[in-house]
Amino acid sequence: MRRAALLLLATAAGTVSAQTPTPPAPGTPPGRFVTYICAGGQDFTARFSEDNELATLAVPGQPDVELSRQTSGSGFAYGDSYYELRGRGREATLAVRGGGAMRCHAVGKPGEPTRSYAAGAATLTLMSDGVFRLRDRRDGSASLLDHGLWSEEVDGGLRLILRGEAVARRSLREAPGGRLVDTAPPGLEFAPLATADPIDEGFRLNGMFRVTPDGGVFTDCLTGRNLHVLA
């Protein structure tokens, strides 16, 4: 997405909830809004309707694609005359009929609660939809250091991968006690917090603002998330 606007967001209304949502039923998508990272291909987002009969795929800079639900086995399937999306759990394959296919992986952990970790004055929050937020309170006031998308990879052990705006790729390994240890110097060690760190301050995001019949909508360039702007 072209960065066309800078917006200072007042996010008191966007407090993170740590309540555990109902897990998706077997054979259904992992969540209503899922971001997929595809090896060697274009990342995309998929928004599934409440009745799971429709999937809307979005790629930055391209028109949305609507796919209807198709018959499948133990997983889920959507398609039209050109595209086909099939998946099971957090794994999916997007194929072009008569062409190639790419394997994709859902970022975050759809269906699981938001959780936060602390390393000194720094707090890392991982949201179930794959968005992360890193901030620091060393000066007594909160400031956003980085935000973006997170996922898990298996590379000599389970790794948590952060793809942010300030740091393109950051890797953390899991340690005993549910801790996360940054693999880059100085090797910050994040300990899990009992409750999710709320969003209770304003910070800057890069993206696109537009006016709709229902009010203002801000689309964050990095994560592709749509945020409704309060009047």
Image (cartoon, rainbow, N blue to C red):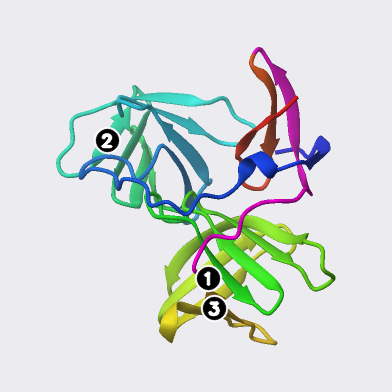
Q: Nearer the viewer, residue 161 or 12?
A: 12
Label 3: state its secondary structure: strand
Q: Amino acid at mark 1?
A: Leu
- Between the residue at mark 2 and the residue at mark 3, the CA separation in whole angstroms equals 39 Å
Labelled pair 3, 1 in contact (Cβ < 8 Å) = yes
Q: Amino acid at mark 3?
A: Ala
202 magenta-colored: yes
- Mark nearer the viewer, 3 or 1: 1
**In the rendered structure, which disc, 2 or 3, sits on the residue that comes first in sequence?**
2
Query: Which residue is at 34% across, 32% downward?
Result: 97
Label 2: state its secondary structure: strand
Q: Nearer the viewer, residue 72 or 197?
A: 197
Task: Determine the image quadrant of residue 206.
Answer: top right
Instruction: Name the residue carrying label 3.
Output: 191
Side of 216 relative to 55 (left or right) = right
Q: Quadrant of the N terminus?
A: top right
Q: Which disc number belongs to residue 77?
A: 2
Query: Which residue is at 67% across, 35% downward?
Result: 219
Q: Quadrant of the C terminus?
A: top right
User: Relative to 71, does residue 182 appear above or below in the rendering?
Assistant: below
Q: Nearer the viewer, residue 24 or 165?
A: 24
Instruction: Name the residue carrying label 1.
Output: 193
Side of 92 relative to 35 (left or right) = left
The picture places residue 214, in percent across and down from the top left corner, at: 64, 16
User: Relative to 69, does residue 105 appear above or below in the rendering?
Assistant: below
Labelled pair 1, 2 in contact (Cβ < 8 Å) = no
225 magenta-colored: no
- Mark nearer the viewer, 1 or 2: 1
Query: Which residue is at 76% across, 68% downward?
Result: 137
Q: Is residue 156 visible?
A: no
In the image, the segment drawn in magenta is 193-213
